[in-house]
Amino acid sequence: MSGLGYSQFRPYFEGRATLAEVTLRIQLDTHDFIRRQYAWFGLQDPAITWLAPGDLVTVRERVAQNRL
């Protein structure tokens, strides 16, 4: 399994890591993944509309307006 969080659990199931260690590893790996995504997409790309976290209402409104 290659998704975030799956491979990090292998040491836990093999008895080589605690659940706390696995949780920390998942958090660190997720953070690294996010940083790579930002670099790949490029923050200056005009084709991408970046939204603030928790901006779900705005997203729904934009989708509704574009479909009308």
Image (cartoon, rainbow, N blue to C red):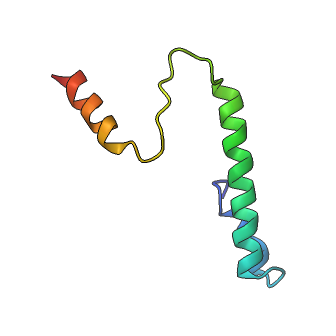
Report the quarter where the C terminus lies: top left
Report the quarter where the N terminus lies: bottom right
| Residue 49, horizontal then vertical, whole percent | 47, 25
Query: Which residue lies most toward the bottom here?
Result: 15
Of residues 40 and 2, the one drawn nearer to the viewer in this rendering: 40
What count of labels does the image hold? 0
For this view, does 46 lie left or right of residue 42?
Answer: left
Q: Residue at x 33, y 36 (%)?
A: 59
Asked if residue 37 is positioned above or below residue 56 in the image, the reply reads above
Q: Residue at x 74, y 68 (%)?
A: 24
| Residue 37, horizontal then vertical, whole percent | 66, 36
Can residue 48 be seen here?
Answer: yes
Query: Which residue lies most toward the right here?
Result: 16
For this view, does 14 lie left or right of residue 68?
Answer: right
Q: Residue at x 70, y 45 (%)?
A: 33
Query: Which residue lies most toward the top here?
Result: 46
Query: Which residue lies most toward the left here?
Result: 68
Of residues 4 and 40, the one drawn nearer to the viewer in this rendering: 40
Of residues 25 and 59, the one drawn nearer to the viewer in this rendering: 59
Asked if residue 9 is positioned above or below residue 61 in the image, the reply reads below
| Residue 28, horizontal then vertical, whole percent | 75, 58
| Residue 31, horizontal then vertical, whole percent | 70, 51
Q: Residue at x 24, y 22 (%)?
A: 66
Asked if residue 60 is positioned above or below residue 30 in the image, the reply reads above
Can residue 7 be seen here?
Answer: no
Of residues 19 and 56, the one drawn nearer to the viewer in this rendering: 56
